[in-house]
Amino acid sequence: MPAPAEPAVSLPADLRTPALVLTDDPSAVGSRDGVTVCDPASAPQRDGGWASVSLSLADETALRRVVSALPPLGRARSYAVVLRSAVSPVTLVPRPEWPALAELDVRLVDGGAVTRVELVKGVPVADVLVALARGTGSPAVAGHGGLVAAPGLDLGLPAVADVVTDDVPASLVATPPAEASTILTVQPVLVPTGTDLEVGPLDEGVLNPRGSAVPATRPAVDLDPGWRPTAALVASLRDVEAVRVSWPAPERLVAGLALAGVPLVGVAPVPPAARERLGDALADLLEPGAAALARDVRSVVLSRAAQDAHAVPAWRERVGARAGLRVAGEPTISLVLTGGADDRARAQVARQVGVEVEVVEPGALPTGDVVLETAADGWWGPEVLRDLLRARRWSGAEVVEMPAEVVHAEAIGATVRRRLATQAYVAGPDRFPGAAGLVLVDRALAGLGTDALRAAGATTYRTHGLAHVARLRGHAGVGDLLRREHVVAQWRGLHLGPLVEPDAGGSR
């Protein structure tokens, strides 16, 4: 299967001059009077700024990376961003302190995207370009965690807000020869190297599982080593049964597709060098003898492994640890046990891995960054909370739901998988009566109902529901649960999928 085409998109012919055009292919842009064309790393400064600044780049990932490493460029009032490959237009949310917009033109063109912005007065170039970069992909909240690159140094980190606080001070990262910063009162730290850092960082704001919960309508295809890990490639593979991986293959491509939840299957042993770069968790899933998992389950576990090894936050944490820097970690969770919670519920919470949780009784003040209210009335896999945090991190949503997709109805002794839209932004959490999903919210929004959350402008992302089986007690809701158009699969008795573990001690 050929890689998605990346057609050239012409730069606007009516650029205001003096104009600066930054592109990854300067030779493709002809010379014009008053127009300076160069690659982003060579962007010159100009007294008085520019009348217009344009970027011509390959795709959304390139835009987010380039913008995070630009040197100071002064001010401008007219901007254009041209992407040769894009799945959606690059949008802009103006900052309230900016002057008014005079023009905003956003469109898809021949498989790419063109965005033109003009303000009535000039503003700092970096402010506008960062805002445009944030308009691509999902509004990931990962941050750099205190790692601040020296001007012009591309750490491969996307343009998202730095997490620099009293607890996580800024640390300047540079390449040799490193000079002390004239802005930050810290000594520069050289960028660490290592085989485990070579694949990442992968931008989970662009490469993520959103849209992965679609059925297969095409047979499996072979991975093409010439592919590049882009949003357009991922979109073109969403409906295939699987992507077969043989070696040699570009490890960054493999990890990027896994990060996005593309169902990869290995057809040959993973070579030692590739295993070292990918990490054991991801490499094990790509071995020919890996466990036979359903397509949707494989998507989840591949994405988990890639996020934990190669997404921006994981890469950032390894860089920080190796350089002796303190970086921002995962948010803490306050889990409020509501009516009906018992020792079994507490045991399920205690089995959660990779998260920092405080259990709060009703009425007590939660202190975590995010809050989950639950009776824990069902069966949880050990990564339920971690999956919620993963989805929150790359979706940027204030509300993240793991729905009651799989429900065990005690009254009829059956387990049903409901037909629900998952791995998608939704209007609000599912309201199936009697069988609640798990809803994680930012602490400032805790206690608000669905309508109030929407009124407050909160966005809701629904992740997969395969790591949790909800319990439906009594007969209420059973009729609706069994409606044919609502059922994907049905089993006799209690059915726990591979992402869910039995109760401690084997009690089921």
Image: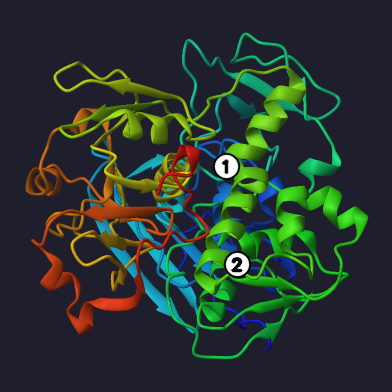
Q: Which mark is residue 124?
A: none
The residue that disc 2 covers is: 230
Name the image quarter holding residue 322: top right
The residue that appears at 71% across and 66% down in the rendered structure is 25
Using the rendered image of the protein, determine whether residue 65 is visible from the camera's viewpoint: yes
The residue that appears at 74% across and 69% down in the rendered structure is 27
Q: Residues within 10 Å of mark 1 (few under 14, many from 20)?
A: many
Q: How many marks?
A: 2
Say which of 219 and 329 sits in front: 219
Q: How crowded is mark 2: few (under 14 residues within 10 Å), some or many (20 or more)?
A: many
Residue 198's spot in the image, x, y percent? 79, 47
Say which of 210 and 99 sits in front: 210
Q: On the rendered structure, is 3 left or right of 297?
A: right
Q: Which of marks 1 and 2 is nearer the N terminus?
A: 1
Name the image quarter holding residue 34: bottom right
Q: Quadrant of the N terminus?
A: bottom right
Say which of 433 and 200 sits in front: 433
Residues at marks 1 and 2, CA–CA distance in whole angstroms = 18 Å
Q: Which of marks 1 and 2 is in front?
A: 2
Q: Are marks 1 and 2 in contact (CB under 8 Å)?
A: no
Q: Is mark 2 on a helix, strand or loop?
A: loop
Q: Is mark 1 on a helix, strand or loop?
A: loop
The residue that disc 1 covers is: 68
In the displayed structure, 293 sits above or below 259; it is: below
Residue 503's spot in the image, x, y percent? 43, 43
In the displayed structure, 28 sits above or below 368; it is: below
What is the three-letter code of the residue carrying label 2?
Thr
In the displayed structure, 362 sits above or below 461; it is: above
Residue 388's spot in the image, x, y percent? 40, 45
Q: On the rendered structure, is 275 left or right of 50?
A: right
